[in-house]
Image (spheres, helix red, strand yellow):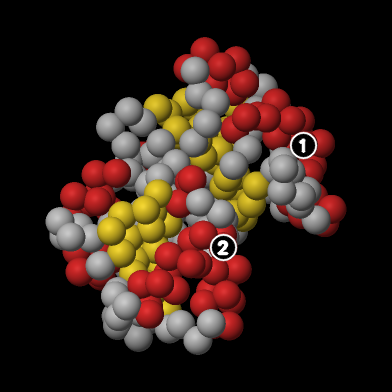
Amino acid sequence: MVHIVGAGPGDPELLTVKGQCYLAAADVVIYAGSLVNPALLGVCKPTAEIHDSAQLTLDEVLAIMAQAEAAGKMTVRLHTGDPAVYGAIQEQMDALRARGIAYDVVPGVSSCFAAAASLRQELTLPGVTQTVIITRGAGRTAVPERERLRALAAHGATMCIFLSISFLADVVAELQAGGYAADTPIAVVQRASWPDEKTVRGTLADICPQVQAAGIDRQAMIIVSPCLGAEYELSRLYAPEFSHMFRQGQA
């Protein structure tokens, strides 16, 4: 069987318990070497075959999985973050299904949530925004016109922008064109949860020179949100007069 496992954002301790169990038991491991922390491979057994998919094509990855399946071996396909977000796993799952190879998916901690943790920031605040948009700018992978950053910015919600740090100036221009004011808070977190993590906070007006000065040009999460440093309402969940199925509110 093939287990598609989310490796988390980088910190080996943020791999799920289930993911670690599969990784420790795997006969064959195919990991995204350009992004996955190699320290995670420390739990693999000495006899495990380990392949770096950064050097492989999709057909070569599938061939390794098929050979392992034919030999009765268990395979872990280790993806960065959560494999459901920009993980390119659908094509792999469809190909495995077509070959009659069983698989499952183990979710992981996404880098957008690791970045929020590093910022010590909740992404949804009462009275500010209750929506998080996970997206990316248009690079080598096209983005539908209706999902351009300027269109999504019109909502004024929290936006977690993946895979776009290399053209941050274009991202800022698109966000402002969509309605975010120049003083809207924005943060950039490079390699969230790694030992060499870098964090830069600013506004749309000043974030670009700060990021350039910090030398951040890859592997970074962009979070733009009115929640960053905002005044907000307290949650009704814990208000003494608020009743719910577990607690009777006080008069």
- Taking the spot 76% from the left edge, 50% from the top edge, the residue there is 142
The label shown at residue 174 is 1
The label shown at residue 191 is none
**Quick one: which residue is furthest to the left in this view?**
46
Q: Is residue 122 in view from this perspective?
A: no
Image location of residue 217, percent across then percent down: 54, 26
Image location of residue 56, percent across then percent down: 51, 51
Q: Are marks 2 and 1 in contact (CB under 8 Å)?
A: no
Q: Amino acid at mark 1?
A: Glu
Q: Is residue 197 in view from this perspective?
A: yes
Task: Determine whether, in the image, residue 77 is placed left or right of residue 90.
Answer: left
Task: Determine whether, in the image, residue 156 is placed left or right of residue 87.
Answer: right
Badge 2: few (under 14), some or many (20 or more) residues near its Cα, within 10 Å? few
Q: Amino acid at mark 2?
A: Asp
- Taking the spot 57% from the left edge, 75% from the top edge, the residue there is 95
Image location of residue 79, percent across then percent down: 42, 57
- CA gap, disc 2 and disc 1: 37 Å
Q: Which residue is mark 2?
A: 59
Q: Quadrant of residue 74?
A: bottom left
- Taking the spot 47% from the left edge, 26% from the top edge, the residue there is 200
Image location of residue 116, percent across then percent down: 42, 45
Q: Quadrant of the C terminus?
A: bottom left
Mark 2 vs 1, N-terminal side: 2
Task: State which mark lies toward you, 2 or 1.
Answer: 2
The residue lying toward the viewer, choosing from 131 and 210, is 210
Secondary structure at numbered mark 1 = helix
**Quick one: which residue is furthest to the right in this view?**
145
Q: Quadrant of the N terminus?
A: bottom left
The residue lying toward the viewer, choosing from 67 and 28, is 67
